[in-house]
Amino acid sequence: MDIGEVVLVSSRLALGAVASFLAIVLWSKTRDVAWMLMVAGTIAAYAETVYSILERFGLSDGSRFVIGRVPFVSILLPNLPTAFYIAAFAVMVARKLKSR
């Protein structure tokens, strides 16, 4: 592993950890559904980062459940944050439409 990969891995872990920590702090302060979904998306994004780094180091292969030749975890984790963000935005849009 060269210095570029070390910087890439450490920066993804550090920034993801800060974002997740602040998201959890926000979660404890608010009970708004849309914000809670945004927090869940941020935490899911960090989980995907950790999983991809473990996979890069060869500590996880994720091949327990596969769809074709692709591990299910490799499909789920990158898409889960986006699904949470979509749900959060949908809640916000529905709230705005309801308040008209």
Image (cartoon, grey):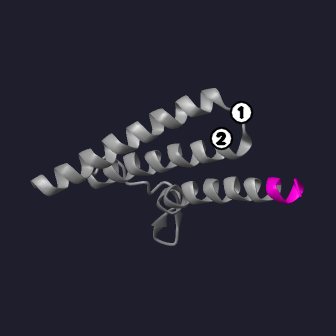
Tag 1 or tag 2, which sits nearer the N-term?
1
Q: Residue at x 60, y 47 (%)?
A: 38
Residue 41 on the magenta span: no
Image coordinates of residue 22 in percent, x first then y, are: 48, 34
Instruction: Indicate left or right for 24 with 60 as reference.
Output: right
Residue 99 on the magenta span: yes
Q: Residue at x 68, y 53 (%)?
A: 88
Residue 36: image tag: 2
**What amino acid is at disc 2?**
Met
Question: Looking at this view, is 10 or 62 the one in front?
Answer: 10
Image coordinates of residue 1 in percent, x first then y, are: 13, 54
- For residue 57, say whether it is visible: no
**What amino acid is at disc 1?**
Arg
Callout 1: few (<14), some (14-19), or many (20+) C-alpha neighbours within 10 Å? few
| Residue 58 position (above or below residue 35) | below
Q: Are marks 2 and 1 in contact (CB under 8 Å)?
A: yes
| Residue 74 position (above or below residue 69) | above
Question: Looking at this view, is 81 or 77 the one in front?
Answer: 81
What is the span of residues highlighted in magenta in the rendered image? Answer: 95-100
Callout 2: few (<14), some (14-19), or many (20+) C-alpha neighbours within 10 Å? some
Residue 68: image tag: none
Displayed quadrant of residue 96: bottom right
- The secondary structure type at the circle numbered 2 is helix
Q: Residue at x 39, y 50 (%)?
A: 49
Image coordinates of residue 47 in percent, x first then y, are: 46, 45
Residue at the spot of label 1: 31
- The secondary structure type at the circle numbered 1 is loop
